[in-house]
Every structure is written in C-alpha cells, then in structure tokens.
Image: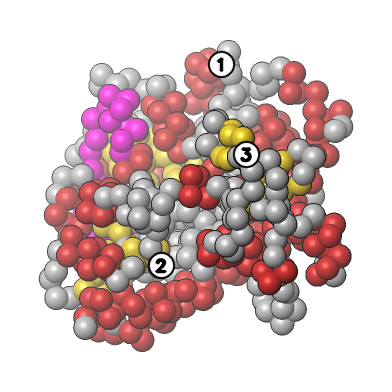
C-alpha cells in the first residue's frame, strides 16, 4: 500500500481526511478496458478503481489520474471517465478536491470498518437477526439499485446546462407547490401514451416519496371516522404512514388469487383502499381484470377512493402489463401513484400522484400555499432528462438488464434448489419469494445464509394481523446484485441451506 504523506487536514462535516501531499496512483494499478466485455466502459473504470480502493492499493488521499489524462491513456471519451469518477464520488470512494482533481476518500471512515458496517435498515428481520453486520459477498436486497445504474454523466451534463442558462431563474423562488410544470407535463404525456392513464400535467402533483404522498393524501380525509383498507400482506412503509396519520387499517387478504379480498373489503367500511394491482407487494400477484372492475364498482357504490400504487410498472418480463385501474375508471375514484425510485434512483425521492378532480381541488386548498417537497433542481433536471430522450434510453437498458437478472435468478434457483423450494413469481417486479419445503423458520434460514456470506430477507413484517403467515417465505431480490453474481450467490445459498 502506498504510504500516507503529510499530516493532512480534515473535513469534519463528511469525516474525510485530505492529505497535504497527494501521491499518484501506482503504474501497477492501471485501469484496462475490455472492448469485448458487454459492461459499459465507464462501469469498467469504476469497478476497477473501486476494487483497488477496497484492496488497499489506493491509499486514502491518493490522487487519481486527471479525467483528460486517463481518457487519453485509455483512448476513450472524457465523458466516460467523468461518469466513472462521478460514480466514485457519489458512492463515497473519492472526493473532488478543488485545484487538485479527484483523490481517494478515507473509505474506512466513510463506510465503516467491514466488521462493523451497519446492515441495511429497510429489512427489519435482518436488522434484528444480524445486527451490525458487514456487507455480505452476495446481497439479494430489494429496493436499492445496482451500482452504476444511475446515469451520472447525462445527469451531470443536464445539471450544468440548466444552472448556466436562463432556466436557472426559478432557483431564486420557492416554486410551484404542485411541482414543476415541465416535469408534470413530461410525466403526464408518458402516462397517457404508454399506460392509458387519463391525465394531464395539471392533475399531477410531485411528492417526496411514497410515505409522504400517503400522509398528505390522508390529511384530506377524516381520521375520526374514515378507515383505510390495504392488501394483506402489503407494503409496510404505507402501513406505517397510515398508522402515523391516526387512521384505522382494515387488512384485506390476498390469498390464492385474491379469493378473500373483496369479502374483506365489503365489511371494512373503508373510504380509501391502497392496492398494487400490477405487481402486488410482496407476492408479485397481478390483479385479474374482473376483480379490477369489481373494485372500481365497489368504490363508486361506497363513495370511496382507490389508491393505485403502480410502483413497478416498468418491470414486467413476460406478458404486456394489464391497463391500470385508473384507465378503467369512469367515475373519478382512482388515485394513481408512481415513483422513480425503482427505475432511476431511490435517493432522489421523487414520486407523483394523479388526482381525480374533487381531490385535486381539496389538495390545492390544503397545500396551495405550502412549499414544494422536492427540490426545484431535481425536478428540472429530470424534466430535461425525459424531454431529450435520455430517460427512454436509460429505461430500455435497465429493463433489459433486469429481465436478464430475473431469468438468471429463476434459472439458478431451479438448477441449485429444484423441488426443495417453492418459488412465487409472476414475471414482474424486482424480487421473488422463496419457500424451503422443510419447514425451517425465517430466523434459521436468514442466519444460515448469513454464515455463508449471503444475505436474504424475511417477510414477516409484511403481514398485519398474523405475522406468522410470512414464516415460510424468504424474499430474494435482484435489483442491486450484479448479474454475474446471481448464479454463484444462489449456489452458495443452496449449499448453506441444504448441504
């Protein structure tokens, strides 16, 4: 490892140490590009530099080659190197030091010692069972995206263009509380043409995440008398938002083919129903067309609203997606909700609601004088990203990659576990539910996997009334794991569970 030169100085805000003298990278740690590799060039650069940082070949404070210099050496475009460096900065492996270019960050301080790094906090069973565990070799998480997915180069270019143009004028005021018009129009056009959603930009409101959307929407209802129904099992983030808002919850069982759903709903007295018909969470079930029609008819007859969360609409791997509930609604009873967390970045916290006229009027009355919940710049960049075609190209690449990962996971589970497990999947979403047939508990399955350096996730907290109903299911996600790690990860998991 190269030595650390000088005493350095600290940036206490980010807990990073900068050296006063910055050694250059060793020639032995050069980056090589493989033109025959399907991995994008910027991703190859990022992967190799990150591997050398993890291995200790690049000490904290090591100065990385300049963008121009590395691009010339590798005979690639500067934007390619720029994108790789932007990813290194965004993930905390490097920092941009004014006047000196990019230097390696103190990764130990940023990410914690491997033995004490915190486990992902969005899976409760694993937090309890594994505690503060290091990052595993194979992490089948759900929700996060694979490193390198975010279109950093295009995003940075658009950001620079906007900030250096007259389009930057809105940064001097608070902006429209409903969201930037350009972004709302872009979303509306795509929903209308690609999903047959009946909307225009004026019926859309931009929000900072699903939970905030639900909380704000519930503020338009009467918490003293109104009940909110939701699927059982269902997304715990929405359930927590409902409880936080002071509403009673009526769970409606999904069961096999939704056979209990309408019966539970009929006796719920609900005025709002949260559903995920295109890819039910967490079962991945697709709501049948007949039930969709029944649900809309029920909402009209009971003066109720349906909150349709189309969170995974972009990821369907076999048949074409069924039209959303909102496109079937002729009585303005469906609130359509979408997000960019699964297809662009969960860190941006951008989602949206398409409100029917009566609720839109209530929303404007309640929030018309408030401040936007999503920063203007994020909205402006996303609007341009969509308008110039970058979004469509990005989404096609991501859909193709997730389709390959879905197929790889299904094939690997079949090859290495076969009939020793049951697999619940419907060709949608970013995860599968796996149920070993030997009756072992979630705790045993999760801890056994962890001992083999594999992380999988429990499902008990997706149930409201009978959490033990989730004991037989383990969530195995593929949104963040690299394609090439899926098969060896499943093989390792199979050996841990069944050897």
Residue 22 in magenta stretch: no
Q: Quadrant of the N terminus?
A: bottom right
- At numbered mark 2, what does the secondary structure look like: helix, strand or loop? loop
Q: Are marks 3 and 1 in contact (CB under 8 Å)?
A: no
Q: Earlier in the sequence, mark 2 or mark 3?
A: 3
Above or below, 403 against 122 in this view is below
Q: Which residue is mark 3?
A: 8
Question: For the residue carrying disc 2, how many other residues have a C-alpha within 10 Å: few (<14), some (14-19), or many (20+)?
Answer: some
- At numbered mark 3, what does the secondary structure look like: helix, strand or loop? loop
Q: Earlier in the sequence, mark 1 or mark 2?
A: 2
Q: CA distance from mark 1 to mark 2?
A: 45 Å
Q: Which residue is mark 1?
A: 370
The residue located at (53%, 65%) in the rendering is 55
- Tell me where the magenta segment starts and ends, as one range: 239-262
**Residue 13, position in %: x, y?**
55, 30
- At numbered mark 1, what does the secondary structure look like: helix, strand or loop? loop
Camera-nearest residue between 84 and 456: 84
Q: CA distance from mark 3 to mark 1?
A: 45 Å
Q: Which residue is mark 2?
A: 137
Above or below, 249 against 129 in this view is above
**Residue 143, position in %: x, y?**
44, 53
State which mark lies toward you, 3 or 1.
Answer: 3
The residue located at (62%, 39%) in the rendering is 8
Q: Earlier in the sequence, mark 3 or mark 1?
A: 3
The residue located at (68%, 21%) in the rendering is 175
Q: CA distance from mark 2 to mark 3?
A: 33 Å
Camera-nearest residue between 243 and 86: 86
**Residue 118, position in %: x, y?**
36, 48
Q: Quadrant of the C terminus?
A: bottom left
């Amino acid at each position: 490892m190269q030595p650390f030169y000088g005493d350095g100085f600290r940036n206490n805000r980010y807990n990073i140490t900068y050296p006063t003298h910055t050694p250059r990278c060793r020639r032995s740690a050069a980056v090589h590009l493989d033109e025959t590799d399907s991995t994008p060039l910027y991703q190859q650069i990022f992967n190799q530099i990150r591997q050398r940082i993890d291995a200790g070949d690049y000490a904290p404070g090591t100065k990385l080659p300049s963008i121009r210099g590395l691009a010339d050496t590798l005979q690639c475009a500067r934007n390619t190197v720029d994108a790789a460096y932007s990813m290194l900065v965004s993930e905390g492996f490097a920092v941009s030091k004014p006047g000196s270019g990019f230097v390696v960050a103190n990764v130990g301080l940023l990410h914690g010692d491997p033995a004490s790094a915190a486990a992902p906090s969005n899976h409760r069973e694993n937090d309890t069972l594994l505690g503060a565990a290091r990052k595993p070799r194979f992490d089948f998480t759900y929700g996060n995206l694979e490193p390198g997915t975010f279109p950093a180069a295009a995003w940075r270019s658009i950001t620079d263009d906007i900030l250096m143009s007259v389009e930057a004028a809105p940064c001097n005021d608070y902006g429209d509380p409903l969201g930037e018009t350009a972004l709302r129009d872009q979303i509306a056009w795509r929903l209308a043409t690609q999903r047959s959603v009946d909307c225009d930009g004026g019926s859309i409101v931009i929000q900072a995440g699903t939970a905030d959307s639900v909380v704000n929407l519930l503020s338009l209802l009467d918490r003293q008398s109104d009940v909110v129904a939701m699927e059982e099992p269902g997304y715990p983030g929405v359930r927590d938002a409902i409880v936080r808002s002071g509403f009673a919850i009526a769970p409606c069982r999904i069961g096999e083919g939704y056979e209990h759903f309408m019966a539970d709903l009929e006796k719920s007295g609900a005025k709002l129903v949260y559903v995920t018909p295109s890819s039910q969470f967490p079962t991945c079930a697709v709501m049948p067309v007949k039930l969709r029609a029944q649900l809309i008819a029920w909402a009209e007859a009971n003066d109720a609203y349906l909150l349709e969360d189309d969170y995974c609409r972009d990821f369907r791997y076999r048949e074409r997606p069924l039209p959303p509930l909102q496109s079937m609604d002729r009585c303005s009873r469906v609130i359509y909700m979408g997000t960019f967390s699964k297809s662009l970045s969960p860190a941006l916290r951008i989602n949206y609601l398409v409100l029917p006229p009566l609720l839109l009027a209530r929303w404007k009355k309640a929030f018309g004088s408030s401040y936007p919940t999503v920063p203007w710049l994020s909205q402006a960049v996303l609007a341009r990203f969509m308008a110039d075609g970058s979004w469509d190209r990005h989404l096609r690449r991501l859909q193709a990659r997730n389709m390959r990962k879905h197929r790889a996971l299904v094939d690997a589970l079949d090859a290495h576990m076969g009939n020793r497990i049951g697999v619940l999947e419907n060709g949608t979403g970013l995860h599968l539910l796996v149920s070993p047939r030997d009756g072992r508990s979630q705790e045993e399955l999760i801890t056994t996997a962890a001992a083999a350096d594999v992380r999988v996730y429990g499902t008990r907290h997706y149930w409201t009334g009978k959490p033990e109903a989730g004991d037989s299911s383990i969530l195995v996600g593929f949104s963040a794991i690299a394609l090439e790690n899926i098969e060896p990860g499943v093989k390792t998991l199979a050996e841990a569970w069944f050897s």
